[in-house]
Amino acid sequence: MYDKTICESALNKHVAILKDFRERMLERVMSEVEMIPNAEALKLHWLRCCSVMQYWKQGNTNVMSLYITLKKVNDTIQWYTKGCSCKSGCTTLRCSCKKSSNKYCSPGCKCVNCVNLPTNPNQAVDDPDFDLEDSEHGEDISYDSDSETDINEFTADTSTTYINYWDIFENYIFALPTD
Protein backbone atom coordinates (compact mmCIF):
# COMPACT_ATOMS: atom_id res chain seq x y z
CA MET A 1 0.00 0.00 0.00
CA TYR A 2 2.86 2.38 0.84
CA ASP A 3 4.52 1.84 -2.53
CA LYS A 4 1.25 2.35 -4.42
CA THR A 5 0.69 5.81 -2.91
CA ILE A 6 2.11 8.51 -5.17
CA CYS A 7 3.01 11.83 -3.54
CA GLU A 8 5.72 14.44 -4.01
CA SER A 9 7.28 13.93 -0.56
CA ALA A 10 7.53 11.23 2.07
CA LEU A 11 5.59 13.38 4.55
CA ASN A 12 2.68 13.81 2.13
CA LYS A 13 2.78 10.07 1.47
CA HIS A 14 2.48 9.31 5.20
CA VAL A 15 -0.37 11.79 5.62
CA ALA A 16 -2.20 10.30 2.62
CA ILE A 17 -1.78 6.75 3.96
CA LEU A 18 -2.98 7.83 7.41
CA LYS A 19 -6.06 9.45 5.85
CA ASP A 20 -6.72 6.31 3.80
CA PHE A 21 -6.44 4.10 6.91
CA ARG A 22 -8.86 6.33 8.81
CA GLU A 23 -11.40 6.17 5.96
CA ARG A 24 -11.17 2.39 5.79
CA MET A 25 -11.42 2.01 9.58
CA LEU A 26 -14.49 4.23 9.73
CA GLU A 27 -16.55 1.37 8.30
CA ARG A 28 -15.33 -1.10 10.96
CA VAL A 29 -15.09 0.77 14.25
CA MET A 30 -17.89 1.31 16.73
CA SER A 31 -16.71 4.63 18.18
CA GLU A 32 -14.25 7.45 17.59
CA VAL A 33 -12.10 6.17 20.47
CA GLU A 34 -11.09 3.16 18.38
CA MET A 35 -9.94 5.32 15.44
CA ILE A 36 -6.29 6.10 14.83
CA PRO A 37 -5.45 9.80 15.22
CA ASN A 38 -5.61 12.17 12.29
CA ALA A 39 -2.41 13.75 10.95
CA GLU A 40 -2.62 16.87 13.15
CA ALA A 41 -3.22 14.91 16.35
CA LEU A 42 -0.45 12.51 15.43
CA LYS A 43 1.93 15.43 14.81
CA LEU A 44 1.13 17.00 18.20
CA HIS A 45 1.56 13.62 19.90
CA TRP A 46 4.87 13.12 18.15
CA LEU A 47 6.09 16.60 19.18
CA ARG A 48 5.19 15.87 22.79
CA CYS A 49 6.97 12.51 22.65
CA CYS A 50 10.10 14.19 21.30
CA SER A 51 9.96 16.72 24.13
CA VAL A 52 9.55 13.99 26.76
CA MET A 53 12.40 12.05 25.17
CA GLN A 54 14.64 15.10 25.45
CA TYR A 55 13.94 15.35 29.19
CA TRP A 56 14.56 11.64 29.70
CA LYS A 57 17.89 11.89 27.87
CA GLN A 58 18.93 14.59 30.36
CA GLY A 59 17.82 12.47 33.32
CA ASN A 60 21.33 11.55 34.48
CA THR A 61 22.65 15.14 34.49
CA ASN A 62 22.45 17.62 37.34
CA VAL A 63 21.11 20.50 35.25
CA MET A 64 18.34 20.14 32.71
CA SER A 65 18.10 22.66 29.91
CA LEU A 66 14.64 23.99 29.19
CA TYR A 67 13.94 25.14 25.66
CA ILE A 68 10.96 27.20 26.76
CA THR A 69 10.99 30.06 29.23
CA LEU A 70 8.29 30.54 31.82
CA LYS A 71 7.87 34.17 30.74
CA LYS A 72 6.89 33.08 27.23
CA VAL A 73 4.44 30.55 28.65
CA ASN A 74 2.95 33.14 31.02
CA ASP A 75 2.64 35.72 28.22
CA THR A 76 0.89 33.17 26.01
CA ILE A 77 -1.55 32.22 28.78
CA GLN A 78 -2.26 35.89 29.52
CA TRP A 79 -2.84 36.57 25.82
CA TYR A 80 -5.37 33.75 25.58
CA THR A 81 -7.23 34.49 28.83
CA LYS A 82 -7.15 38.27 29.42
CA GLY A 83 -8.67 40.96 27.28
CA CYS A 84 -10.96 43.94 26.99
CA SER A 85 -14.75 44.21 27.18
CA CYS A 86 -15.32 47.10 24.79
CA LYS A 87 -18.84 47.71 23.52
CA SER A 88 -18.16 49.62 20.29
CA GLY A 89 -15.66 47.61 18.30
CA CYS A 90 -12.30 48.55 19.90
CA THR A 91 -11.75 51.46 17.50
CA THR A 92 -10.35 54.01 19.97
CA LEU A 93 -7.28 54.09 22.18
CA ARG A 94 -9.58 53.61 25.16
CA CYS A 95 -9.41 49.89 24.43
CA SER A 96 -6.99 48.31 26.89
CA CYS A 97 -5.77 45.86 24.23
CA LYS A 98 -4.85 48.70 21.89
CA LYS A 99 -3.05 50.55 24.70
CA SER A 100 -1.09 47.47 25.74
CA SER A 101 1.87 45.98 23.95
CA ASN A 102 -0.43 43.40 22.32
CA LYS A 103 -1.86 45.97 19.90
CA TYR A 104 -4.66 43.61 18.80
CA CYS A 105 -7.52 41.99 20.66
CA SER A 106 -6.81 38.48 21.83
CA PRO A 107 -8.97 35.35 22.04
CA GLY A 108 -9.66 36.22 25.70
CA CYS A 109 -11.43 39.48 24.84
CA LYS A 110 -15.16 39.87 25.40
CA CYS A 111 -15.59 42.85 23.08
CA VAL A 112 -18.60 43.35 20.82
CA ASN A 113 -18.24 43.85 17.03
CA CYS A 114 -14.46 44.03 17.29
CA VAL A 115 -12.50 45.45 14.35
CA ASN A 116 -9.17 45.31 16.21
CA LEU A 117 -8.15 41.92 14.84
CA PRO A 118 -4.76 41.05 13.32
CA THR A 119 -6.46 39.89 10.11
CA ASN A 120 -7.94 43.36 9.49
CA PRO A 121 -5.35 45.22 7.32
CA ASN A 122 -7.09 48.62 7.41
CA GLN A 123 -7.08 49.52 11.06
CA ALA A 124 -7.87 53.13 11.83
CA VAL A 125 -7.03 54.61 15.20
CA ASP A 126 -9.56 57.23 16.22
CA ASP A 127 -9.20 60.09 18.63
CA PRO A 128 -8.96 58.65 22.19
CA ASP A 129 -11.56 61.12 23.49
CA PHE A 130 -14.09 60.27 20.78
CA ASP A 131 -16.13 57.48 22.35
CA LEU A 132 -16.54 57.21 26.11
CA GLU A 133 -18.78 54.13 25.84
CA ASP A 134 -15.84 52.12 24.50
CA SER A 135 -14.03 52.10 27.83
CA GLU A 136 -14.36 49.15 30.17
CA HIS A 137 -16.51 49.54 33.27
CA GLY A 138 -14.55 50.22 36.44
CA GLU A 139 -11.38 51.08 34.50
CA ASP A 140 -9.55 54.36 34.88
CA ILE A 141 -10.18 56.11 31.57
CA SER A 142 -7.55 58.81 31.99
CA TYR A 143 -5.04 58.78 29.17
CA ASP A 144 -1.49 60.07 29.50
CA SER A 145 0.64 60.55 26.42
CA ASP A 146 3.56 62.66 25.28
CA SER A 147 2.62 62.59 21.62
CA GLU A 148 -0.36 63.31 19.41
CA THR A 149 -0.93 59.65 18.62
CA ASP A 150 0.52 56.48 20.05
CA ILE A 151 0.37 54.43 16.89
CA ASN A 152 4.15 54.10 16.59
CA GLU A 153 4.64 53.40 20.29
CA PHE A 154 3.15 49.91 20.01
CA THR A 155 6.14 47.73 19.20
CA ALA A 156 4.98 44.19 19.94
CA ASP A 157 2.47 42.25 17.88
CA THR A 158 1.47 39.28 20.02
CA SER A 159 -0.15 37.35 17.21
CA THR A 160 3.00 37.49 15.08
CA THR A 161 5.18 36.81 18.11
CA TYR A 162 3.03 33.84 19.00
CA ILE A 163 3.23 32.40 15.49
CA ASN A 164 7.01 32.92 15.38
CA TYR A 165 7.30 31.29 18.80
CA TRP A 166 5.57 28.13 17.59
CA ASP A 167 7.59 28.09 14.37
CA ILE A 168 10.81 28.22 16.41
CA PHE A 169 9.44 25.52 18.74
CA GLU A 170 8.62 23.20 15.83
CA ASN A 171 12.00 23.80 14.18
CA TYR A 172 13.71 23.02 17.46
CA ILE A 173 11.71 19.83 18.00
CA PHE A 174 12.30 18.63 14.45
CA ALA A 175 16.05 19.26 14.87
CA LEU A 176 16.29 16.99 17.94
CA PRO A 177 18.39 13.85 17.50
CA THR A 178 16.29 10.70 17.56
CA ASP A 179 18.94 8.18 18.66
Image (cartoon, helix red, strand yellow):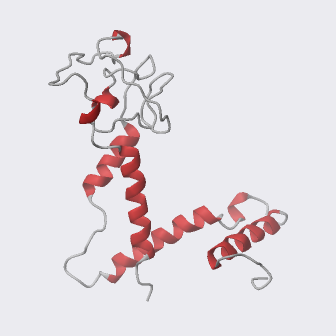
Residue 35, image x and y in percent? 71, 65
Location of residue 157 (image quadrant) = top left
> Residue at the location (48% across, 69% down)?
47
Residue 131, image x and y in percent? 36, 11
Tally the marks.
Answer: 0
> Residue at the location (20% across, 77% down)?
63
Position above or below: 57 against 42 = below
Position above or below: 103 against 4 = above
> Residue at the location (42% across, 31% down)?
109
Residue 96, image x and y in percent? 31, 27
Residue at the limit of the structure toward the left, as seen here? 146
> Which of 64 and 160 lies nearest the eye of the viewer?
160
> Which of 34 and 17 lies nearest the eye of the viewer?
17
Left or right for 121, reference 127: right
Q: Quadrant of the C terminus?
A: bottom left
Left or right for 109, reference 127: right
Q: Quadrant of the N terminus?
A: bottom right
Residue at the limit of the structure toward the bottom, as seen here? 179
> Residue at the location (33% across, 38% down)?
102
Location of residue 91 (image quadrant) = top left
Location of residue 170 (image quadrant) = bottom left
Residue 66, image x and y in percent? 28, 69
